[in-house]
Image: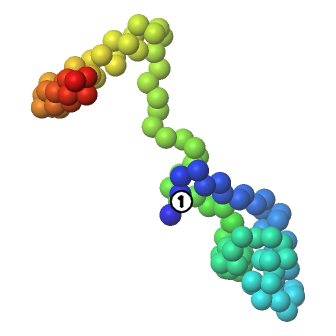
Amino acid sequence: MAKKGQVFQQYTDEFKLGAVKAYIEGSLSYKVVANQLEIRSCTQLKVWVRKWMNGEKFDVRKGQSNPLKGRPRTVFDTVEEERDYLKAQVDYLKKRYPNLVKEASSVNKNAIK
Protein backbone atom coordinates (compact mmCIF):
# COMPACT_ATOMS: atom_id res chain seq x y z
CA MET A 1 0.00 0.00 0.00
CA ALA A 2 1.24 3.46 -0.83
CA LYS A 3 2.48 5.63 1.99
CA LYS A 4 1.76 9.32 2.37
CA GLY A 5 4.24 11.38 0.38
CA GLN A 6 5.56 8.38 -1.54
CA VAL A 7 6.74 9.16 -5.06
CA PHE A 8 6.33 6.47 -7.68
CA GLN A 9 8.86 5.87 -10.42
CA GLN A 10 7.34 6.03 -13.89
CA TYR A 11 8.93 4.26 -16.82
CA THR A 12 8.26 4.87 -20.50
CA ASP A 13 6.98 2.07 -22.71
CA GLU A 14 10.29 2.13 -24.64
CA PHE A 15 12.22 1.60 -21.42
CA LYS A 16 9.93 -1.26 -20.39
CA LEU A 17 10.30 -2.93 -23.78
CA GLY A 18 14.08 -2.56 -23.62
CA ALA A 19 14.14 -4.12 -20.16
CA VAL A 20 12.00 -7.05 -21.30
CA LYS A 21 14.24 -7.65 -24.32
CA ALA A 22 17.35 -7.42 -22.14
CA TYR A 23 15.96 -10.17 -19.93
CA ILE A 24 14.68 -12.41 -22.74
CA GLU A 25 17.74 -12.12 -25.00
CA GLY A 26 20.28 -12.40 -22.18
CA SER A 27 21.03 -15.18 -19.75
CA LEU A 28 20.72 -12.96 -16.69
CA SER A 29 18.16 -13.25 -13.90
CA TYR A 30 15.35 -10.82 -13.24
CA LYS A 31 17.23 -9.39 -10.28
CA VAL A 32 20.46 -8.76 -12.19
CA VAL A 33 18.67 -7.07 -15.11
CA ALA A 34 16.61 -4.96 -12.68
CA ASN A 35 19.78 -3.87 -10.86
CA GLN A 36 21.59 -3.03 -14.10
CA LEU A 37 18.69 -0.88 -15.34
CA GLU A 38 18.04 0.60 -11.88
CA ILE A 39 14.50 -0.73 -11.62
CA ARG A 40 13.40 -0.66 -8.00
CA SER A 41 12.04 -4.20 -7.92
CA CYS A 42 12.66 -7.31 -9.95
CA THR A 43 8.98 -8.14 -9.50
CA GLN A 44 8.13 -5.16 -11.70
CA LEU A 45 10.30 -6.61 -14.45
CA LYS A 46 8.53 -9.97 -14.05
CA VAL A 47 5.17 -8.25 -14.56
CA TRP A 48 6.43 -6.51 -17.70
CA VAL A 49 7.77 -9.78 -19.12
CA ARG A 50 4.50 -11.59 -18.39
CA LYS A 51 2.47 -8.82 -20.06
CA TRP A 52 4.78 -8.77 -23.08
CA MET A 53 4.52 -12.55 -23.50
CA ASN A 54 0.71 -12.38 -23.28
CA GLY A 55 0.60 -9.55 -25.83
CA GLU A 56 -0.89 -7.07 -23.36
CA LYS A 57 -0.12 -3.38 -23.09
CA PHE A 58 2.24 -2.40 -20.31
CA ASP A 59 0.06 0.29 -18.75
CA VAL A 60 -3.56 -0.71 -18.60
CA ARG A 61 -5.66 0.92 -15.91
CA LYS A 62 -8.62 -1.17 -14.82
CA GLY A 63 -11.92 0.58 -15.54
CA GLN A 64 -10.44 4.06 -15.66
CA SER A 65 -9.99 6.21 -18.69
CA ASN A 66 -8.01 8.81 -16.76
CA PRO A 67 -6.45 7.98 -13.37
CA LEU A 68 -6.40 11.64 -12.34
CA LYS A 69 -10.10 12.16 -12.90
CA GLY A 70 -12.28 11.99 -9.81
CA ARG A 71 -15.75 13.24 -9.11
CA PRO A 72 -16.57 16.50 -10.84
CA ARG A 73 -16.01 19.57 -8.70
CA THR A 74 -18.78 22.00 -7.93
CA VAL A 75 -18.10 25.23 -9.80
CA PHE A 76 -19.44 28.51 -8.49
CA ASP A 77 -19.81 31.77 -10.39
CA THR A 78 -19.13 33.94 -7.36
CA VAL A 79 -17.55 33.67 -3.94
CA GLU A 80 -20.93 34.46 -2.38
CA GLU A 81 -22.51 31.40 -4.01
CA GLU A 82 -19.75 29.20 -2.65
CA ARG A 83 -20.13 30.74 0.82
CA ASP A 84 -23.89 30.11 0.82
CA TYR A 85 -23.35 26.53 -0.34
CA LEU A 86 -20.85 25.87 2.45
CA LYS A 87 -23.12 27.52 5.04
CA ALA A 88 -25.96 25.25 3.96
CA GLN A 89 -23.70 22.21 4.43
CA VAL A 90 -22.71 23.32 7.93
CA ASP A 91 -26.33 23.99 8.89
CA TYR A 92 -27.33 20.56 7.64
CA LEU A 93 -24.61 18.89 9.68
CA LYS A 94 -25.57 20.87 12.80
CA LYS A 95 -29.18 19.69 12.44
CA ARG A 96 -28.14 16.12 11.67
CA TYR A 97 -25.64 15.83 14.53
CA PRO A 98 -26.69 18.25 17.29
CA ASN A 99 -24.58 16.45 19.91
CA LEU A 100 -21.39 17.43 18.14
CA VAL A 101 -22.24 21.11 18.36
CA LYS A 102 -22.81 20.88 22.14
CA GLU A 103 -19.61 18.89 22.72
CA ALA A 104 -17.53 21.31 20.68
CA SER A 105 -18.79 24.34 22.62
CA SER A 106 -18.09 22.66 25.99
CA VAL A 107 -14.59 21.75 24.84
CA ASN A 108 -13.94 25.37 23.84
CA LYS A 109 -15.09 26.62 27.27
CA ASN A 110 -12.82 24.14 29.05
CA ALA A 111 -9.87 25.14 26.91
CA ILE A 112 -10.36 28.84 27.77
CA LYS A 113 -10.34 28.26 31.56
Q: Which residue lies furthest to the front in this view?
A: 113
Left or right: 15 in relation to 70: right
Q: Name the residue under label 1.
A: 2
Indicate how the structure is coloured in the image.
Answer: rainbow
Q: 15 and 93: which one is in front?
A: 93
Image quarter where the C terminus lies is top left
Left or right: 2 in relation to 18: left
Please tell me in which quadrant of the rendered image residue 87 appears: top left
Q: 27 and 105: which one is in front?
A: 105
Left or right: 61 in relation to 28: left
Residue 107, image x, y percentages? 21, 30
Residue at 53 percent of width and 57 percent of height = 3
Using the image, determine if residue 75 lies above or below residue 42: above
Q: 21 and 32: which one is in front?
A: 32
Three-letter code, disc 1: Ala
Residue 62, image x, y percentages? 53, 59
In the rendered image, is residue 25 in sight?
A: yes
Left or right: 89 in relation to 109: right
Using the image, determine if residue 108 lies above or below residue 44: above
Q: How many marks?
A: 1
Using the image, determine if residue 79 lies above or below residue 27: above
Residue at 76 percent of width and 70 percent of height = 39
Using the image, determine if residue 42 lies above or below residue 6: below
Q: Residue furthest bottom?
A: 27
Residue at 85 percent of width and 77 percent of height = 36
Q: Could you tell me which secondary element the residue under label 1 belongs to?
A: loop
